[in-house]
Image (cartoon, rainbow, N blue to C red):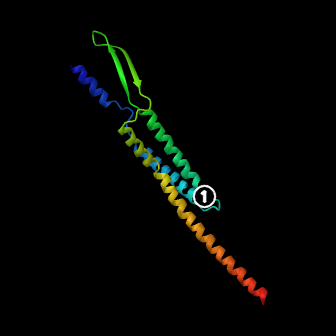
Amino acid sequence: MSHLLQAAAVAEATPGPRAGVSFFSALIFIPALLFIIAGMVVLQIYLSKRDNKWLGLILPFIGIGVSLTAILGTVFFTSPGSTVISYDEYGNVIHEETIKELFHIDPATIIMTIVNFLLFNIPSIILLLIYFACRESVKRRTALESENHHKEIDKMNIQDLE
């Protein structure tokens, strides 16, 4: 029994790969992630302020596409199945077979699909809010420019009449 205790002590003292994220990798990962998110927001603002209104919808549509991919993965890869295991007279496994039911929908899968859809579409919703806010400012700007243009035309017409 003492050999087992010695082996356990050696296993605890032996340095090995640590589970989790180290401080230094998080120190690099978090700023990089924030930089990517800020870049996406700036790109969304830039695309949304263009005259072509469809450019601002590119990133939200990509987000919705990623969301639908995740949902299809949830539906197709979480379908329940049953496992049939055959044993011999000594209790050893002779044969193991998993039978998957195709498109078996249970309440847990439906709830998980809805939650995944909502979670994966949070960035799409934020990008759409940015889009609509920018498009509103573009509409106000073009309306103001149009109004100023009409005033200038009215002034020119008055000057022509004189």
| Tally of marks | 1
The one of 146 and 50 positioned closer to us in this rendering: 146
**Which residue is found at the position 69% from the left and 76% from the top?**
149
Disc 1 element: helix
Other residues around mark 1 within 10 Å, as few (<14) / some (14–19) / many (≥20): many
Residue pointed to by mark 1: 47
- Seen from this angle, which residue lies furthest left? 1
Residue 44, position as x, y percentages in the image: 56, 57
**Which residue is found at the position 36% from the left and 32% from the top?**
15
Residue 22, position as x, y percentages in the image: 40, 42
The one of 123 and 71 positioned closer to us in this rendering: 71
Q: Vertically, is 48 above or below 16?
A: below
Q: Quadrant of the C terminus?
A: bottom right
Residue 50, position as x, y percentages in the image: 63, 61
The one of 14 and 27 positioned closer to us in this rendering: 27
Which image quadrant for residue 80? top left
Q: Quadrant of the N terminus?
A: top left
Which image quadrant for residue 138? bottom right
Amino acid at circle 1: Leu
- Seen from this angle, which residue lies furthest top? 89
Which image quadrant for residue 25? top left
